[in-house]
Image (cartoon, rainbow, N blue to C red):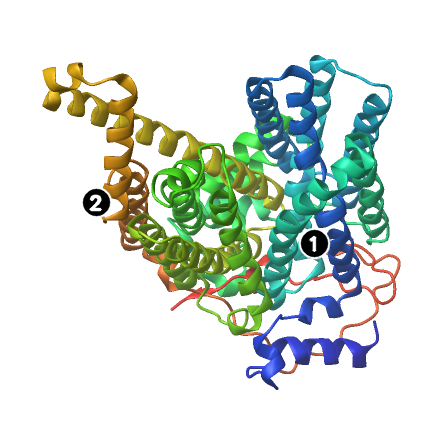
């Protein structure tokens, strides 16, 4: 990249005020970086054309077995494989070239889809074979998620990370809406097997984008890093970063975490040792703990998607087997994320990242309470869309903080932990919300039986069912909280209370401010073939790979 081009890109990124109304819509600035632009364009293709297996796998399993239990078993297998891959790949990403890992993972995922296509073409009806393929899908996809999260900060400067993460959210949630809809249209036309083939072909675009990236090797051992970590062993929280004029790196942010990051994560350590070191690093950093705790609280307490079918039937008059009401409830949240992504310019230039994370999580809890209180479907849909919009903000700045605040030497392991939270949180939420609603139903049923006693004994079963169903539906429509509505409201309130408690207990979060970008940076020299710095490798002409050390990517505490 020429000095003039680099200066133009930096000046666009650092502009303190938007130049026009367009700056309030999608923040396209990261796409000026060729490497990120190629990866993002490939993700657009894959988000739609590579998401057909979301529909194809459960449909094929249900067709073969006639049982939803097989579909649930496949979901459990995929979840376990994805979690294992996130933890393992996070440790590997810190000691090997991340481009190589991404390339291998994307190729493995494409081959998995090709194998699914082949077994469908051959008329395969073996459930064990399908479950093995689902396990490989989870392993490769978990590796892709984790390694991509640790790669983006190497491609994009810190001041553009919020915009880059917003663009990624826009693609991910847009694809989650369009992909399954398109798959549902294509299934009767081309068959399930062809959907797998479409997924495999779409992934080739990602493979090409990754192959064109510059090498992304791990940072070489820094002289004195171990001594710096040990010297910082008594420091607590993010405040340990403020001293020594920014010379302390991320491995010195907290006692156990600092030592783990430097000493426990070396290339000579075992995979298990590196993984444990990564979790110690994460647990020792108060800011990262606060960010992940807030995000986990918002997902576990405030993600009531498991109750949408019951809510649609009992409150909004939907059919028992699912109908438009259920579909609209599931679509409203991602629609809100997409709308916020289209308006990302309104928030990506903000610097109070910590306060935005806490505020967005609390706003999501309030939106969930509104869903539980809604007696009309349109109110619930509006609340869910609003919740999706604030969750887009939460996701963008949560990812930005974890990427920019973490030293590159341990960034893969931190991203692995983040992937575990992102994948595991909604699963735990489904379990908690469904169990709580079922328990309330059992209590309600027993209470009704005790109240009516012998009178119910004289009624026919059908008449009793009609009376009870009508009474509960009228109560829900009339504003009485019971069953799913009570559980949803309680979850939203728990989200707000928990987020407030975390923000009060760990003030580092609300005080975290992203550093102001430099207004007049010196021209960057073209990297020579032998130039290797702590965070980058030689870069092909036209590609921008961030070489700023982690200390410059971190915020101060105001």
Q: Nearer the viewer, residue 66 or 319?
A: 319
Asked whether the viewer can see residue 549, the reply is no
Q: Nearer the viewer, residue 531 or 280?
A: 280
Residue 181 image label: none
Quadrant in the rendering for residue 63: top right
Q: Residue at x 80, y 81 (%)?
A: 4
- Residue 510: % across, % down: 36, 61
Q: Nearer the viewer, residue 44 or 375?
A: 375
Q: Residue at x 76, y 46 (%)?
A: 49
SS class of the residue under badge 2? loop
- Where does label 1 land, which residue? 534
Q: Nearer the viewer, residue 526 or 415?
A: 415
Nearer the observer, disc 1 or disc 2? 2
Mark closest to the chain's N terminus, 1 or 2: 2
Q: Is residue 58 above or below residue 523?
A: above
Q: Which quadrant of the figure contains the N terminus?
A: bottom right
Q: Residue at x 53, y 34 (%)?
A: 277
Question: Alpha-carbon neighbours of circle 1 within 10 Å: few (<14), some, or many (≥20)?
Answer: some
- Residue 522: % across, % down: 71, 79
Residue extending farthest bottom: 19
Q: Are marks 1 and 2 in contact (CB under 8 Å)?
A: no
Give left or right: position of 124 versus 177: right
Q: Residue at x 62, y 50 (%)?
A: 177
Asked whether the viewer can see residue 439, the reply is yes
- Residue 153: % across, % down: 65, 56
SS class of the residue under badge 1? loop
Quadrant in the rendering for residue 451: top left
Residue 480 image label: 2
């Amino acid at each position: 990249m020429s000095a003039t081009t680099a200066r133009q890109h930096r000046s666009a990124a650092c502009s303190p005020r938007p130049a026009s109304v367009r700056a309030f819509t999608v923040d396209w600035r990261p796409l000026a970086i060729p490497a990120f632009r190629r990866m993002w364009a490939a993700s657009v293709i894959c988000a739609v054309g590579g998401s057909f297996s979301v529909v194809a796998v459960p449909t094929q399993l249900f067709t073969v077995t006639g049982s939803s239990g097989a579909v649930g078993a496949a979901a459990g297998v995929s979840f376990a494989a994805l979690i294992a891959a996130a933890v393992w790949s996070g440790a590997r990403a810190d000691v090997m070239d991340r481009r190589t890992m991404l390339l291998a993972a994307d190729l493995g995922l494409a081959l998995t889809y090709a194998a699914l296509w082949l077994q469908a073409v051959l008329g395969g009806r073996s459930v064990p074979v399908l479950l093995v393929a689902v396990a490989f899908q989870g392993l490769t996809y978990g590796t892709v998620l984790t390694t991509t999260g640790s790669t983006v900060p190497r491609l994009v400067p810190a001041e553009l990370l919020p915009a880059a993460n917003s663009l990624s959210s826009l693609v991910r949630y847009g694809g989650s809406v369009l992909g399954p809809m398109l798959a549902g249209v294509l299934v009767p036309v081309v068959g399930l097997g062809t959907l797998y083939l479409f997924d495999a072909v779409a992934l080739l675009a990602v493979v090409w984008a990754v192959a064109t990236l510059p090498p992304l090797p791990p940072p070489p051992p820094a002289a004195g890093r171990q001594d710096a970590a040990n010297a910082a062993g008594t420091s607590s929280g993010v405040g340990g970063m403020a001293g020594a004029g920014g010379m302390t790196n991320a491995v010195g942010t907290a006692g156990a975490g600092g030592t783990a990051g430097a000493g426990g994560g070396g290339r000579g350590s075992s995979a298990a040792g590196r993984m444990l070191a990564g979790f110690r690093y994460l647990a020792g950093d108060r800011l990262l703990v606060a960010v992940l705790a807030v995000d986990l609280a918002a997902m576990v307490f405030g993600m009531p998607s498991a109750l949408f079918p019951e809510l649609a039937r009992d409150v909004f008059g939907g059919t028992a087997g699912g109908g438009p009401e259920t579909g609209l409830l599931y679509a409203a949240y991602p629609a809100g994320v997409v709308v916020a992504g289209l308006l990302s310019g309104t928030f990506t230039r903000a610097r109070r990242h910590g306060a935005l994370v806490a505020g967005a999580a609390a706003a999501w809890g309030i939106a969930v309470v509104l869903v539980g209180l809604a007696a009309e479907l349109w109110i619930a849909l509006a609340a869910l869309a609003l919740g999706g919009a604030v969750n887009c903000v939460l996701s963008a700045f949560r990812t930005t903080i974890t990427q920019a605040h973490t030293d590159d030497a341990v960034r893969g392991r931190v991203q692995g932990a983040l992937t575990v939270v992102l994948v595991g949180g909604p699963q735990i939420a489904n379990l908690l919300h469904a169990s709580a609603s079922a328990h309330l139903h059992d209590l309600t049923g027993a209470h009704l039986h005790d109240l009516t006693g012998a009178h119910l004994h004289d009624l026919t079963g059908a008449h009793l069912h009609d009376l009870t169903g009508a009474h509960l539906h009228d109560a829900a429509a009339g504003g009485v909280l019971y069953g799913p509505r009570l559980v949803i409201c309680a979850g939203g309130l728990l989200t707000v209370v928990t987020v407030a408690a975390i923000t009060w207990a760990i003030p580092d979060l609300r005080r975290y401010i992203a550093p102001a970008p430099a207004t007049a940076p010196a021209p960057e020299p073209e990297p020579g073939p032998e130039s290797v710095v702590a965070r980058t490798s030689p870069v092909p002409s036209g590609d921008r790979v961030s070489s700023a050390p982690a200390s410059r990517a971190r915020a101060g505490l105001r």
